[in-house]
Amino acid sequence: MQMAQVPSQSNVGNACQASRDLRKKRRNYLKAKIEELQNNNKIKIVWDLYRENNDFRKGYQPRTNIVMDKRG
């Protein structure tokens, strides 16, 4: 916790490296997802194409599952 509060050169360098790594992982994920969508489009799996497109547009939206007991 104390390391995060003190902005030393090594902490800043580690944060920058972590940020670069995360951007790279996201870029690779998006490239793979785009290739998958292109393949689905080529083999006419349209439903997956629309579903993934909506997921990209809307972003993450948590779903809630309501469970009722015996009394409702």
Image (tube, rainbow, N blue to C red):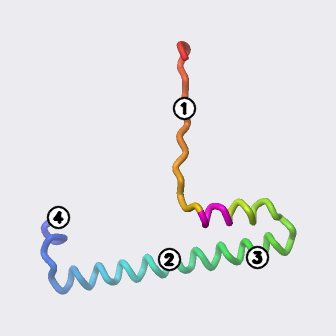
Separation of residues labelled 4 and 2 (CA atoms): 26 Å
Separation of residues labelled 3 and 2 (CA atoms): 20 Å
Q: Nearer the viewer, mark 3 or mark 2?
A: 3
Could you tell me if the residues under marks 2 and 1 are in contact, i.e. CB atoms within 8 Å? no
* Residue that appears at 43% across and 76% down: 22
Separation of residues labelled 3 and 4 (CA atoms): 45 Å
* Residue that appears at 73% across and 72% down: 37
Please give the residue where the numbered disc 3 appears in the rendered image.
38
Badge 2 density bin: few <14, some 14–19, many ≥20, Cα 10 Å: few
The x and y percentages for residue 20 are: 40, 83
Q: Amino acid at mark 3?
A: Gln
User: As drawn, which residue projects farthest toward the right?
Assistant: 44
Q: Dot 1 lies on which element? A: loop
Q: Dividing the picture into quarters, in which one does residue 34 lie?
A: bottom right
Image quarter where the N terminus lies is bottom left
Q: Amino acid at mark 2?
A: Lys
- Does the segment drawn in magenta span residue 13? no
**Label number found at residue 25:** 2
Please give the residue where the numbered disc 1 appears in the rendered image.
66
Tell me if residue 17 comes above or below residue 37 in the rendering.
below
